[in-house]
């Protein structure tokens, strides 16, 4: 949640964010994926899908809204698969 808030505050909240429309990678951090999935990745998507106008800095409430959308999406995702661990016979001994 901390990362989501930081990314929204620095990359989405300014009235004209640097590199708007290209500032959110498609991979590398779960919040990046979630921002694309929830259309909170850039100001154009935020306007098109959420009705929050471009060209005006986001209010605190609007930032909270974007973070809540990201967090909701992340919480709905299944946990990542667990890789099985191979154990040698020596490690498998139980005392």
Image (cartoon, helix red, strand yellow):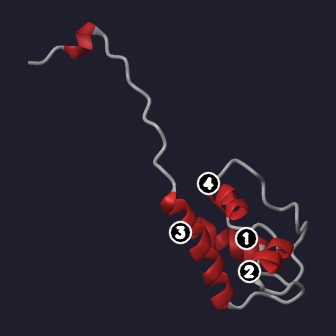
Which residue does the image show at 71% across and 48% down from the upper left?
27
* Labels 1 & 3 near each other (Cβ < 8 A): no
Disc 1 target residue? 40
Residue that label 3 marks: 72
Residue at 81%, 70% (x, y): give it. 42
x, y percentage for residue 87?
32, 16
Question: Looking at the image, is mark 1 or mark 4 nearer the viewer?
Answer: 1
Describe the element under mark 1 as helix, strand or loop: loop
Give the mark nearer the N terminus: 1 vs 4: 4
Q: Tell me if 85 is positioned left or right of 30 in this view.
A: left
Q: Calculate the distance from the C-alpha at mark 2 to the C-alpha at mark 4.
A: 21 Å
Q: Disc 2 or disc 1, which is closer to the eye?
A: 2
Which residue has dot 4 on it?
A: 30
Q: Earlier in the sequence, mark 2 or mark 1?
A: 1
- Whether the residues at callouts 2 and 1 have beta carbons within 8 Å, the answer is yes
Checking the image for residue 78, the label placed there is: none
Local crowd size for mark 4, using a 10 Å CA cut-off: few (<14), some (14–19), many (≥20): few
- Closer-to-camera residue (44/83): 44
Residue highlighted by disc 2? 50
Mark 4 or 3, nearer chain start: 4
Q: Residues within 10 Å of mark 1 (few under 14, many from 20)?
A: many
The quarter of the image holding the N terminus is bottom right
Comparing marks 4 and 3, which lies closer to the viewer?
3
Q: Quadrant of the C terminus?
A: top left
At mark 4, the secondary structure is: helix
Q: CA distance from mark 1 to mark 4?
A: 13 Å
Q: Residue at x 44, y 29 (%)?
A: 83
| Kind of element beneath mark 3 | helix
């Amino acid at each position: 949640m901390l990362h989501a808030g930081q990314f929204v505050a620095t990359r989405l909240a300014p009235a004209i964010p640097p590199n708007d429309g290209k500032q959110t990678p498609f991979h590398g951090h779960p919040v990046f994926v979630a921002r694309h999935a929830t259309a909170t990745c850039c100001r154009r998507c935020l306007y098109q899908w959420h009705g929050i106008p471009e060209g005006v800095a986001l209010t605190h409430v609007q930032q909270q809204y974007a973070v809540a959308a990201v967090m909701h999406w992340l919480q709905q995702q299944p946990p990542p698969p667990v890789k099985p661990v191979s154990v040698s016979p020596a490690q498998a001994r139980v005392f």
